[in-house]
Amino acid sequence: MYKKILVCVLVIYGSILPANASTENREDILTSQDLNTVASEAKSWRGTRYRYGGKDKKGVDCSHFVYAVYNQIFEGYDYRMASEYLHDSDFSLTKSPLVGDVIVFPSVRGSSAHMGIVTDVRGAKFIGAQSSTGVKEASFAPGSYWGKRPYRILSLLPSE
């Protein structure tokens, strides 16, 4: 399905792994090229204006932004709406996020779901297409605008 795989194993707290997964850390398996390619492609969209339903650098919404970045790197990557990632078998919740993972903010009290791509794990930053700013890096650190909303960080699972 995918020619390259961004995430090879799910690591939860570094100790609970699926039976068929390697005991290596995801960072040890992934090349820095894989991680940097996702982040670089995402950052190349900075300044693109937000447009609901937009699919290109003339204007893009959050789910089409993530799709465009991942599709550039992973041939045959399928489009999903932000809310669909939470139940997608190609992704798994991770407690050990890496640059390039997907962050999803589920809909809360009538707000729409939102998403982006993690760009800085320690600094708690992601890049996404926000309606107020267009494609821009934002914080999900506690106390920040996005950090006050519940979120899930998801890793792409290896294709079989």
Image: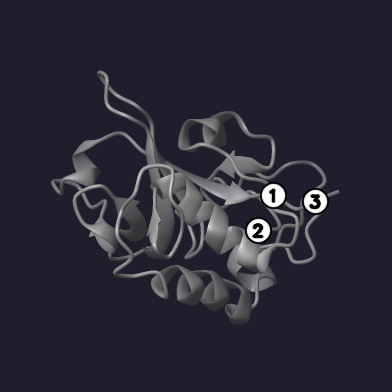
* Colouring of the image: one colour
User: Which residue is found at the position 49% from the left and 50% from the top?
Assistant: 64
Above or below for 70 versus 132: below
In front of the other: 33 or 84 = 84
User: Which residue is found at the position 36% from the left and 56% from the top?
Assistant: 128
Above or below for 91 versus 141: above
Asked which secondary structure carries label 2, the reply is loop
Q: Which mark is residue 18?
A: none
Give the residue number, with chain letter if any, for mark 3. Answer: 159
In front of the other: 57 or 120 = 57
Give the residue number, with chain letter if any, for mark 1. Answer: 157
Q: Which mark is residue 7?
A: 2
- What amino acid is labelled 3 in the image? Ser
User: Which residue is found at the position 55% from the left and 45% from the top?
Assistant: 12
Asked which secondary structure carries label 1, the reply is loop
Q: Is residue 1 left or right of residue 99?
A: right
Above or below for 79 versus 108: below
